[in-house]
Amino acid sequence: MYGRNPILSSLNEDNVLELYLKKDFSDQRFIDLAKKNKVRKIEFVPVEKLDKLVHTSKHQGVVALIKEYSYLSLNEAINQIKSKDKSLILVLDGVEDPHNLGAIIRSADAFDVDMIIIKEHGQVDVTPIVRKVSTGAIDHVKIVRVSSITRALEKLKEIGYWVYAADGSGDVDYSKISYDNKTVVVMGSEGFGISRLVLENSDFIIKIPMFGHVNSLNVSVATGIILAMIKSKN
């Protein structure tokens, strides 16, 4: 991982294994946190080594080797939030771009999403780019990987969640719903949207009305708009 904000967040969460700093790096917060958390290696190196480690010069003078991301099982995540009367879960059905996933995680943290559910296959995982784009939000959002989105939705519906799939084929304006109590929002992939089976297992298909010359939004932008609307109603 590289970049000051995401690494500082990972240091705060004790997720850093090794820390590499540019020779003239002077932000003492990084060094103090690394020592506090007993990071196994803190090394000041030439900027060329940082460039080589991450294949870019946009590292802001700090690079870290971090712990592998730990996904939760669906049951684990549900058990952690089962006492909540109101709950918001985000399901991603096939998001493939790491920049989109990173931006979505950032929005999920901003709007108090309880968990994000992604597929084990056919979808981007939590990569270094995802961590970087999330600017530290990845350390505060629960992410669940499941083999079947459809089965996950069935389980959530059994325990009282209502499922709202956001799709261009929808006939319900996303802003006209109250989103009471336990809510699941499903967003689809960049190229293909939401799969047929997932749409069929949703309670409502919602859409964002469009008034300009384009007929769709980037999935991370659309997700942020919908999450903000839901939180404004609760």
Image (spheres, helix red, strand yellow):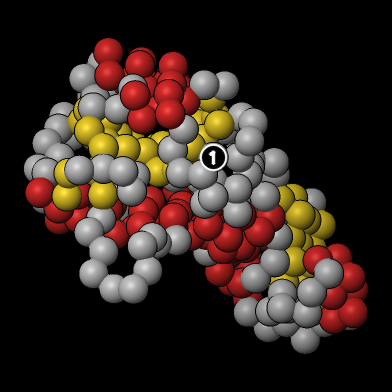
The answer to whether residue 35 is seen in the rendering is: no
**On screen, residue 48 above or below 227:** below
Residue 178: x and y in percent read: 9, 43
- Is 144 above or below relative to 106? above
Is the residue marked by circle 1 packed among few (<14), some (14-19), or many (20+) residues within 10 Å? many
Image: 58 above or below 110: below
Report how many numbered discs are placed on residues in the image. 1
Residue under the image location 15 percent in, 40 percent down? 179
Give the residue type at disc 1: Gly
Q: Is residue 103 visible?
A: yes
Q: Secondary structure at mark 1?
A: loop
Location of the N terminus (image quadrant): bottom right
Residue 55 image offset from top left, x and y in percent: 83, 69
Residue 42 x, y percent position in the rendering? 79, 63
Task: Give the residue number, with chain letter if any, for mark 1.
Answer: 94
Residue at horizontal 63%, vertical 76%? 28
Residue 171 position (above or below residue 33)? above
Residue at x-position 61% and y-position 40%: 123
Give the image quarter of residue 24. bottom right
Relative to residue 47, is residue 16 drawn left or right?
left
Closest to the observer, 85 or 12: 85
Front-most of residues 232 and 76: 232
Q: Is residue 199 left or right of residue 76?
A: left
Instruction: Determine the image quadrant of residue 232.
Output: bottom left
The quarter of the displayed image where residue 20 is located? bottom right
Q: Residue at x 84, y 75 (%)?
A: 51
